[in-house]
Image (cartoon, rainbow, N blue to C red):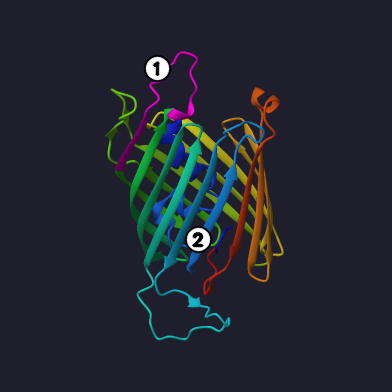
Amino acid sequence: MLLLASPVFAGNEDVVFRFHYLHPDLLNPAINGSAFIPRACLTYNKQWTGIRESPRTMVASAAIRIGNYDFYNPRQLVNTSRFRSRERVGLGLSLFTDRNGPYSSRGINLAYAYHLPLDNAYFSMGLSGSVRQTILDQTVFSPTDPGDPVLPGTRESFTRLNAAFGAYYYSPGVFGGIAIHDLIPLENRMEQGEVIKPDMILHGGYLFSHFGKPGLEIRANIRFLDFHALEYDLHFRAYLRKVHWIALSYRSSQAVVLHVGFNIKGFYLAYDYEASLTSMVRYQSGTHGIHLGINLGVRRTRYQ
């Protein structure tokens, strides 16, 4: 499918948590390849409309299950190549850019997953590695006191490497997993004395089917920042004619999100609107997200 904290370090993790419903491969590296067909996703998100220099994010991701799909050629004909692998390896690639006032970050993530068949289900384990650049640009400020030591007017930048590990179980109805991001503790170069510690994510849900067709999906995601601060997201999605959907999410950051998605001959168009339940609602008109997509293959199995 192609789908068109401290702000310094929470950007990528917020991307992972915020877009889990359209970019599940970012939530847990073990999910890469679980859809069985090649998928690529592109999302644009603009937060807090009405506030100058409010956060904006773009994220792109792609995943493939080696050897377990029929791929379309430009004429929409099915490739009948004899190439087949053991159909257990999933690969993933993701890119992101995130900007929040003077803070900005960009990065790339590569993932590998191995899927083991069980009785009417699969269990997978995955590992990913990432490279990320973070920038603090204080030249955008205009201090009343040019000699203010708090705002030296400099531009700081550094790059860090890290990794994530995950495990995932999925069947036609039940799915769930665990992932640990930022496995390598690193010093926060912009906050002396602080260390970037691992985050743990627990996620799972159930897909209710009606006569073999997806009907209602319920899922929950829980994130433990530094293994103690808790965030969560509850997501309810109703499928219409198997492919269209309407969904509602509640986030522990006191926000409600409405999602709608349409599928027209293999092409997808999705939109989401997030409304804050805090006093911020008086200063901004919500967060908007746009997603476009297309399926790149024919799913041969019943798994979603």
Three-letter code, disc 2: Ser
Residue with the mark numbered 1: 150
Image depth: mark 1 or mark 2 in front: 1
User: Label 2 belongs to which residue?
Assistant: 171
Q: Residue at x 45, y 49 (%)?
A: 96
Q: Quadrant of residue 134?
A: top left
Q: Which residues are magenta?
A: 139-160
- As helix, strand or loop, the secondary structure at mark 1 comes to loop
Residue 296 versus residue 195 in the image, above or below: below
Q: Which SS class for mark 2?
A: loop
Relative placement, left or right, of 6 versus 267 is left
Q: Position of residue 110 (x, y in %)?
A: 36, 56
The answer to whether any part of residue 279 appears in the image is: yes
Residue nearest the observer in this picture, 31 or 106: 106
Q: Is residue 39 above or below residue 140?
A: below
Mark 2 neighbour class, 10 Å CA radius: few under 14, some 14 to 19, many 20 or more: some
